[in-house]
Amino acid sequence: MRKLLDVARLVPPEMKAFRQVFEYETEDERATVASALRELNARPRLLDIEGNEAAVISWECSCLQKKCGACAMIINGLPRLACDTRLAELAGERVTLDPLAKFPVVADLVVDRDAVFTKLRDMGVWHDNERSLLTQDKASDWAYEATRCLQCGCCLEVCPNYVPDAIFGGMAAMNPMARLLEETPKAERKRLARSYKESVFGGCAKALVCRNICPANIDIDRLLSRANARAVWGRH
Ligand code: SF4
Ligand code: SF4
Ligand code: FES
């Protein structure tokens, strides 16, 4: 299989935006965008398709197993995880790679997703998380489903209502809140419910554009309905 990786470049310290194409060949049908990037960067000299010497391609990864969300990027126009995107499933020879568009670009395909985690901190998720772990001895299946969120940002990329640093935190904020709402007794949910209404319910148009993009296949519809029922309508 031969692919041409067409990569958006922004190389420090110049930070001048341009595109660079790299040739990648493999016999491995299971090769992913992540394995291609690793192989390119491991070459003793990285040359682009025109034979020009190129700087190492900056991108983020940690687990390479669809567990950490770090490798989220725009692949052929859609937000996806590089380690979960097989080259063989991408039509055509050319594969375009761009950084997520909603966050500041640090270099090449690396973005600063600090806004996602700052939102969780401001919503008090870490504090309540600690309390929840101390008081609950058994998590429900729905709480478990919510923990599968990678905070990768793919859903935020397609959400028409999400803007970093605004009040609405999107589904990356809904999931941890949904888990806490599942685990917190009704009488103790007041602060959580207030925070949820402000940072999730109030900004979400519920058109669910985000639903089909989630690489973790989280059941966003039902988690959202359950969290709304608990936080907004006071049902259990
Ligand atoms: S809901 Fe899915 S797409 Fe959105 S941040 Fe979590 S794992 Fe990523
Ligand atoms: S349902 Fe619509 S507004 Fe709400 S998070 Fe998903 S894409 Fe955004
Ligand atoms: S490297 Fe962790 S999800 Fe891709």
Image: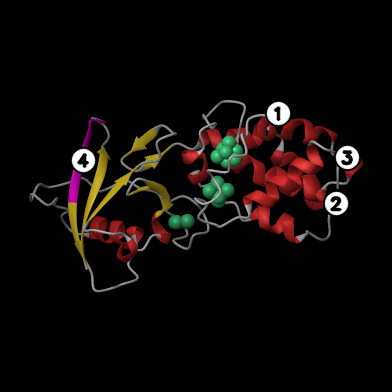
| Element assignment for label 2 | helix
Magenta stretch, main secondary structure class: strand
Q: How many marks?
A: 4
Q: Amino acid at mark 1?
A: Glu
Q: Amino acid at mark 3?
A: Glu
Q: Amino acid at mark 4?
A: Arg
Q: Amino acid at mark 2?
A: Thr
Residue 214 visible in image: yes
Marks 3 and 2, how far apart at CA: 12 Å
| Element assignment for label 1 | helix
Left or right: 166 as drawn, with respect to 82: right
Q: What residue did someone put label 3 on?
A: 188
- Count residues near mark 3 (Cα–Cα under 10 Å), then give few for <14, some for 14-19, many for 20+: few
Tell me the tag on residue 135: 2
Left or right: 226 as drawn, with respect to 104: right
Indicate the position of residue 152 as horizontal and vertical percent values: 51, 47
Left or right: 212 as drawn, with respect to 222: left
Marks 4 and 3, how far apart at CA: 53 Å
- Count residues near mark 1 (Cα–Cα under 10 Å), then give few for <14, some for 14-19, many for 20+: some
Give the magenta range.
15-21
Determine if the magenta segment contains residue 49. Answer: no
Would you place residue 198 above or below residue 223 in this image? above
First in sequence: mark 2 or mark 4?
4
Marks 4 and 1, how far apart at CA: 40 Å
Q: Is mark 4 within 8 Å of ligand 3?
A: no
Residue mark closest to the camera, 2 vs 4: 4
Q: What residue did someone put label 1 on?
A: 198
Q: What residue did someone put label 4 on?
A: 19
First in sequence: mark 3 or mark 1?
3
First in sequence: mark 3 or mark 2?
2
